[in-house]
Amino acid sequence: MQLSNTNFIFSNQPRYRLARHGLFWGVVQLYFTVLYGVFPISYFLHRGYGKPEAFFLGFFSSGVSSLVFMPAHMVLSYGIIYVLFPRYLDKGPYWKMVVGVILFSFLSASASALLSTSVVAPLHAWLGTSRARGGGLTYLLMAGLRGGITVGGFAAAIKLVKIWYLKEQAYRQIEKEKFNAELQLLKSQIHPHFLFNTLNNLYALTLRKSEQSPAVVLKLSQLLSYMLYDCNASEVPLEKEIAFIRNYIGLEQLRYGSRLDVSMNFHGDLKGIQMAPLLLIPFLENAFKHGTSEQLEQAWIFLDLSVDDHVLTFKLVNSRDADTAASTEGGVTSVEATSVEATVGGIGLQNVRKRLELLYPGRYELKIQPEEETFLVDLTLRLPRELAVLKPNKMPVAEMPV
């Protein structure tokens, strides 16, 4: 049995509980055997015994004595951790627990005094290691109280540490579940938001009876397979996220045709990098919904993504209609990015900022700069170097040429 196993410490199975208690009382036995073995060893050496015999007889004498006193120590230890703690530690009243400790201490000291006079003293007399002791019953009670408090204090401390640890773990589990629930909610908002926009694109093509409609359906199924399977993991390879971005932009280009000019650059250390899935898509959705779709003339989008020493830099600039910009922002600066998100980006940009705060707190810088005819998003993200454990991919994402 490995002591590092958490079952050994926290399991309520009988075999683990017996092993824990056996280890504790074994340590107590060893502690008192060594502590109180000095006096009989000195006595036997003084009587002319050799060192091996003196050490053996001395430790044997103190070991038997500590074993005899163990039930008295158990009275206080188990009284505290199995009677008083369950009843009064969480809900009180604490004065009852104090009274209980005093009562169990008296019972432990009385049992120790009784064992001392009826068992330990005759044993030492038989071994010839008896020492003169004064004080009578008072001395025996104080000696028993000292030993009981020593052992009971250690037992209570161990129990308190276990209780604190279990409560801390329960609190962390609640926080983790709350974090995952909030993150999952934000993630789930992306899926219908993205699907709604993409179906709008498909609807526009079908109205024109475009021959590209089957290609749109095929690419949409590839994108959805990525969202359904890969995006269940906490992190995905950056290369797959880039393939998803290319496919998404490809769908938008099918919709807008020659009216949209797209420039994309992906460079740097892209291999082996992991990041949260669908983190950058809301920026693209915002660029098309509030930029390209509102322009009657030529629209353009510039995207640059690079990775250098696990620092991801994402820059997205899109054109937009000057009249729409003036009616929405009225010259808002990047300092007021949050209000801009609420006005221009809707749920998308607010969502991504919340996800960044949850997933990468203190490790990102997001700048949103609306201008009269352009809209700039500049994200710097310091990605962790350790790789997350990913779920196996069931369906590959095919990359659509743009």
Image: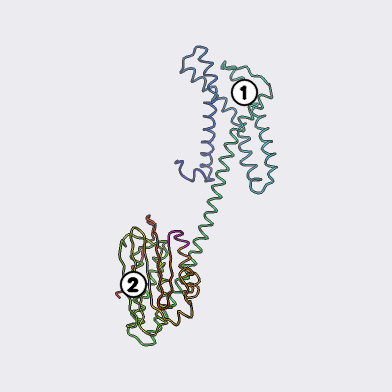
Question: Observer-nearest residue: 73 or 206?
Answer: 206
Which class describes the residues within 10 Å of circle 1: few (<14), some (14-19), or many (20+)? some
SS for tag 2?
helix
Coordinates of residue 354 in the picture (x, y in percent): 48, 65
Q: Magenta stretch containing residue 369, yes or no? A: no
Q: Amino acid at mark 2?
A: Arg
Q: Which residues are magenta?
A: 357-364
Question: Observer-nearest residue: 291 or 41?
Answer: 291
For marks 1 and 2 on the same chain, the one whose residue lies earlier in the sequence: 1
Q: Which mark is residue 119?
A: 1
Coordinates of residue 300 in the picture (x, y in percent): 35, 78
> Horizontal placement of 240 versus 41: left or right?
left
For this orientation, the residue located farthest to the bottom is: 208
Q: Which mark is residue 288?
A: none
Distance from the alpha carbon under mark 1 to that under mark 2: 86 Å
Residue 70, compared with residue 134, is above or below; it is below
Which class describes the residues within 10 Å of circle 2: few (<14), some (14-19), or many (20+)? some
Give the residue at x 44% y 41%.
Answer: 2
> Horizontal placement of 174 versus 199: left or right?
right
Toward which corner of the image does residue 315 lie, by quadrant?
bottom left
For disc 2, the marked residue is 246
SS for tag 1?
helix
Q: Amino acid at mark 1?
A: Val
